[in-house]
Image (cartoon, rainbow, N blue to C red):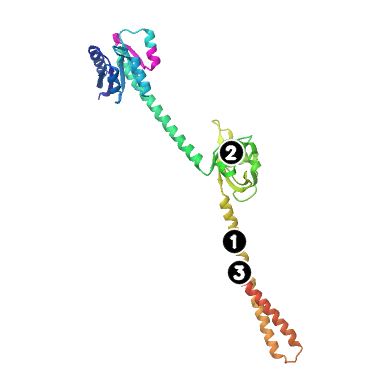
Amino acid sequence: MAEPLRVLLVEDSADDALLLEREIRRGGFDLSLTRVENEAQFLSAISQAWDVVVSDYVLPRFTALGVLRHLRHLHLDVPTIVVSGTVTESELVAAMKAGAHDYVQKQNLARLVGAVRRELGEAAGRRRRREAEDALREAQERFRFVVENTADVVYRLRFPDMVYDYLSPGIERLTGYGPREINGVGLNGLVVSATDTAGRPVAIDKMEWARRIEQFGEFSADYQVRTKSGELRWLADHSFPWRDGHGRLLGAVGTLVDITVRRDLEAQLTQAQKMEAVGRLAGGVAHDFNNLTTAILGYSELMLRRLGADDPLRRYVAEVTRAAERAAGLTRQLLAFSRK
C-alpha cells in the first residue's frame, strides 16, 4: 500500500513542477501535492498540515529563504527541501543555516525521493523526542505542583555531612525555617527529643542514620522540634536509601509529616486510660470498704441495743458508729468518682 504524502510545492514553473511531482510519485508515494507560486499563496496554504515542503531557491517574487523565515516564525517543524538549477555554494550554505533540511539540484532529481524519505524519518524522530520531552516536562510539573503544595515535606539528605540538598517548601510551613536556614541550624539544632516508632529514644546522628538505612533499608523516627517561633511540634520522619549507579550509599530520601495533633490525641488517650484505671481501682476499693463499714455499723447497732441507757460504754460505741458513718460517706464519694 502506497505511503500517503502531503507536499507543498513552492515553484513558479509548471514544467519543473511536473518533473518534481513525477519524481516523487516514482518513489511509491500516494501523493497529495499543492503548488504555490508566491508568498501570499504560500502563507494561505501553510496553515494546512504538510509532510514536506519542496521549494525552488529563487522565484520571481519569493525565495526559499522567505519560506524558511515564515516556517521559523510560525514555529512549524516541516521538513523543507530546497531545489535549484543554478545556485551557488554560498547560497546553499545560507539556505541550510536558515533551516533547510536538504537541497537537491534540478539536474539530479534522482536524489529527491531519498531526501524526502530521510527527512520524513528525521521529522518523525524529532516529533517523538518532542512528545517524550513534553511528557517528561508535564510529569515534572505535576511532581513539582504536588511536592510544593502538600503539607508534608519531601527531602534528600546527603551523607556524611548531613546536608539537605533538597527540601520542599513545606518545611517553612512546619518549622518557620527555610531550606537554607535548616542547613545552617542543622536538624539536631531543632530537635528537642527523638524516638523510634515504639516510643524508645533514638539517636539521629549520621552514623546511626546510615547504620539503620544500611541494615533495615529504611529509617523511621519521631522528632519533637522547636520551631522558629518557639512552638513545639512533632514530626514523623520516614526515609529510604539514596544510592548512586554503583549501589554506594549517598544519603537518604524521605518525608517529614506533622503529627503534632496525633501525638496530642495519643497523650489525651493515655491520660484517659490512666484515669479509667484509677476509676476502676477506686470503685473496687470503695466496694470493699463499704462492706467493712456495713459490718461495723451493724455490730455497733447490736451493741447499742444490749447496753443500758446509763452504760458508760454507749459513748464509745456511739463514736465508732459516727466514724463508720463518715467512712460510709467517703465510700459514696469514691463510688461517684469511679462512675465519672
Left or right of residue 120, residue 314 in this image: right
Q: Badge 1 local density, few (<14 within 10 Å), some, or many (20+)? A: few
Residue 304 location, x and y as percent? 70, 88
Disc 2 marks a residue whose amino acid type is Gly
Marker disc for residue 68 = none
Q: Which residue is mark 2?
A: 178
Residue 181 location, x and y as percent? 62, 37
Image point 31% across, 21% down: which residue? 52
Q: Badge 2 local density, few (<14 within 10 Å), some, or many (20+)? A: some
N-terminal-most mark, 3 or 1: 1
Q: CA distance from mark 2 to mark 1?
A: 38 Å
Question: Closest to the observer: 43 or 304?
Answer: 43
Left or right of residue 301, residue 88 in this image: left
From which residue to which does the magenta span run? 94-108
User: Helix, strand or loop at disc 1?
Assistant: helix
- Which of labels 3 and 2 is toward the front? 2
Residue 68 location, x and y as percent? 35, 18
Q: Which residue is mark 1?
A: 272
Q: CA distance from mark 3 to mark 2?
A: 50 Å
Image point 39% across, 16% down: which residue? 98
Residue 154 visible (yes or no): yes
- Residue 324 vertical placement versus 100 (above, below): below
- Tell me if label 3 and label 2 are in contact, CB under 8 Å: no
Question: Is residue 103 inside the magenta stretch?
Answer: yes
User: Helix, strand or loop at disc 2?
Assistant: loop
User: Which quarter of the figure is the C terminus placed in?
Assistant: bottom right
N-terminal-most mark, 3 or 2: 2
Residue 120 location, x and y as percent? 33, 22
Disc 1 marks a residue whose amino acid type is Ala
- Tell me if label 3 and label 1 are in contact, CB under 8 Å: no
Q: Which residue is mark 3?
A: 338
